[in-house]
Amino acid sequence: ALAVGPHVVIAGGVNAQRFLADLHVFHAASACWSSPRVFGPLPTARMRPALAAAPADPDDVRAPTFFLFGGTRAWGAAAAVATATTRHDGDLYAVTLRPAPAAAMF
C-alpha cells in the first residue's frame, strides 16, 4: 500500500488460489474505494511489489503518480528467497491517478 496525495493505493496481492493484478484506490476525502481505469500496459499479477510516489506534474496535485516495481509470483518459502528469475518481476510501471468520476466509486 502507498499513500499518494489524498489517496491510498493497493496494488497486486494474492488470495488462496492465485496472484492478483488488482489496482484499488481509497479516496480519503470521500471515504470511497475505486478501481481506476488504466490506459497502457497493465501490471501483471504479483504480490509484494514496491510502490513509490512521485509527482507527474508538480503543479497538478489532482493527478499524483506512483511507480510500481517488482514483486514476486512465488509461493511459501520460495517467496522469501525469490530473486530475478521467472518467479520475480523486474518490470516498472508508472501510474498517474486522475480524479475518479463518482460513478466509478463503490
Image (cartoon, rainbow, N blue to C red):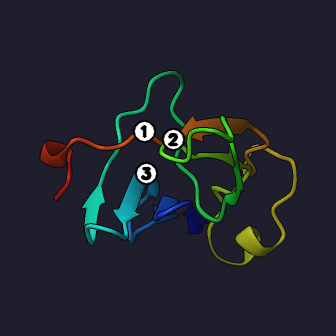
77 up-or-down from 30: above or below: below
Residue at numbered disc 3: 23
In the rendering, at what x and y percent does residue 61 appear? 55, 47
In the rendering, at what x and y percent does residue 106 appear? 16, 59
Q: Residue at x 47, y 64 (%)?
A: 6
Q: Residue at x 74, y 37 (%)?
A: 91
40 to the left or right of 82: left
In the rendering, at what x and y percent does residue 80 appear? 78, 75
Q: Residue at x 12, y 44 (%)?
A: 103
Q: Residue at x 84, y 70 (%)?
A: 81
Residue at numbered disc 2: 63
25 to the left or right of 60: left
Residue at numbered disc 1: 98
92 up-or-down from 77: above or below: above
In the rendering, at what x and y percent does residue 3 appear? 57, 67
Query: Which numbered disc covers residue 86?
Result: none
Of the image marks 2 and 3, the number of the one nearer the N terminus: 3
